[in-house]
Amino acid sequence: MALNVRLVPDKKYIRPGDAACPGCPEALGLRYLGMALGDKAVLVVPAGCSAVIQGIIPRNAFHFPTVNIVFAAGASTAAGMAAAYEVLGKDAIVVVWAGDGGTADIGFASLSGAAERNDNILYICVDNEAYMNTGIQRSSLTPYGAWTTTTWTGKKEHKKDLPLIMISHKVPYVATASIAYPHDFIAKLKRAASIKGFKYIHLHAPCPVGWKFDADKTVHVAKLAIETGMWVLFEYYNGRFSISPPSRPYIDKSKRKPVIEYLKLQGRFRGLSKDDIERIEKYIDDTWSWYVLLEKWSNMGKDISRLIERQ
Amino acid sequence: MVVLPLTGNYAVAWAVKRARVKVIAAYPITPQTTIVEKLSEMVENGELDAKMIRVESEHSALAAVYGAAIAGARAFTATSSHGLLYMHEVLWWVSASRVPLVMAIVTRAIGPPWNIWTDHSDLLDQRDTGWIISMAESNQEAFDLTLQAFKITEDDRVNLPMIVGLDAFILSHTTAPVDVLEQEDVDRWLPERKQLYVIDPNNRFSLGNIASPKDYMMFRYDIEKAMDNARRVILEVDREYGKVFGREYGGLVECYKCSDAKYTVVAMGAWAGDAKEAIDILRDNGYAVGVLRIRFIRPLPVNEILNYLSGMKGVIVLDRSVSFGAGGQLFTEVSSILASRGRPPAMKGVIAGLGGVDVSYSEIKDIVLKFINEVEDQGWFIKRQEWFMPYEYSFKDYG
């Protein structure tokens, strides 16, 4: 998927004066969203940081038509809007822009419902790996070992693999993305927008405040997540699972940077023991084994169906 | 006139069809379920050109029709009891978004223990949410109110959502003749959907981001103003509907034989019909009694209650719900209004029929007669609550 930057609209979808913290990854992600979808996007924002980033009524830093909604109702509200646009013959891309809490935890039932119904929406989980808006509490997407204000000695459980759960819903499109790879993210947004039905993109979004790193390191930390293999970019489309170009080199374990380079930049991992780090290394290896196998299996599946056709 | 034998639930579904609703979302719960079953059937056989979203919960049901409504479509949902309670936070979001939306509530008791029969606690739990809240007495009225709800909510003086309540089983599952009107007559009477704003790519509008405390309070006052406007609009729509279709109910309340009454029974919902029968018998025996039926609990019919009831010798309020530690909700509201103008009439709040306990017209007659005798014997009094019990209370005494 090649993307010509010169063809991306230069219109600004996040206006100056937004209320994001310095170094906020969500403000970056929203800019890319505007570049990819332009004027067709209508945003649904459940409770979370992005409800605050918009600023205070009567002003709004978002240049998208935006509906704020209660925490657990991102996907369901969007489903209703998409149904109305269809029945009224209006051309729009309904985008849910939700955090990891609104997606993986309190909003998970409505997300799962909309996915199973294949409602025509694009759901984006902006994953900063904790409840940042309420002051850094753990979520089911907080990684093992991370300090939060509800896990003072580090979280004892691993991050759940939400993108794989979404693939299990048999939806037409699932992808992961990172704010450090705008080309990849924008291309995925464009592809998702071209598909009718339920689309899910999981955007990795390092938060300087909650992860405790310097505000000028957001993109650097996000990049390290890819280079160490902590976060893997992939795309699931037409029944095929494929690891995306920025992550492909790291299929080869020897190309991955040591995870300590990623962890040591972040204050939230300050309390990790040697054992903890080994557990995280094992988590990375296990995750990659799964993804590599999935890629193989989904491609094998395609070959098998071809074989059957020939019979 | 097209008269069909319909249950209360089917009557609601027919009104939704007549209003040409575009998006429906609902989650099944007894006794509401047959409304959405009927609507699904209408959508699938092409009778109704609408999208049906078969959501995974009531929270999502209301959120989905809210999304449809702000996107510009006429939308509808229905629920009962726990389903309504599960929706509760979304109710607030809808009304404060000032978006017209209609929901039917088939009133049902709240557990535990599980109980599927009628009780007004679920409906009255929504009093403070900023929804217009009405309650039907008959299947015909359930149809008429549902249809009128679209006109009331979409009036530019209102822009608030509305609940149409009907009692579980007594109305919802009981068949009666209902005039469902001709489609072309309804089309002439009910205009295309109107609303304050629409959110879509051509309407770059943003809703619900943070407001300062001062702005927030202004928005809240604006809802109160709209609720006040709704009083007038409800009356106008009721009169106009009466002129066009021949059925007028009296607006926020219906006063049955209370103009020359000395005693009045206040009730809401289906059993107001039983109260009317009770009153007829009492009148035959020489008692000057009437029924004030509450059709709308929000906006509260303040002037009507004052005008009809402040000169009464006695007012007895029947509540099919209770606010524990305070008494019946209707009694609390009616008595507070009456206390605002001089010495109120003698008053009693009676809590009866909870969880679907059957209360017959002859029992209501006995309840009212007892009240009249008490007032005549003892003179003026106010009794906040008296429970009309189905059998003698013999649970363990915790005192």
Image (cartoon, coloured by chain):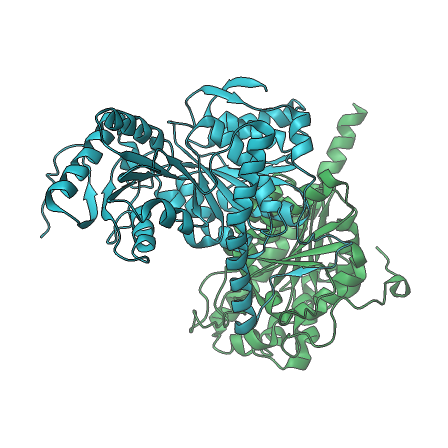
Locate the N terminus of chain A and report the quarter of the image it occupies: bottom right
Q: Is residue B269 left or right of residue A201?
A: left
Q: Is residue B333 left or right of residue A176?
A: left
Q: Nearer the viewer, residue A244 or A173?
A: A173
Residue B151: quarter of image = top right
Residue A223 position, x and y percent, is: 70, 70
Q: Nearer the viewer, residue B240 or B267?
A: B240
Residue B150 position, x and y percent, is: 59, 40
Residue B210 position, x and y percent, is: 58, 68
Residue B136, above or below A47:
above
Q: Nearer the viewer, residue B386 or A192?
A: B386
Q: Nearer the viewer, residue B225 or A293?
A: B225
Can residue B61 be seen here? The reply is no
Residue B273: quarter of image = top left
Q: Is residue A252 left or right of residue A159?
A: right
Q: Residue at x 41, y 50 (%)?
A: B303
Can residue B217 be seen here? The reply is yes
Q: Residue at x 71, y 66 (%)?
A: A62
Locate the C terminus of chain A and report the quarter of the image it occupies: top right
Q: Is residue B180 left or right of residue A96?
A: left
Q: Report which colour depicts chain B.
A: cyan
Q: Report which colour depicts chain A.
A: green
Residue B247 position, x and y percent, is: 52, 29
Q: Residue at x 71, y 41 (%)?
A: A239
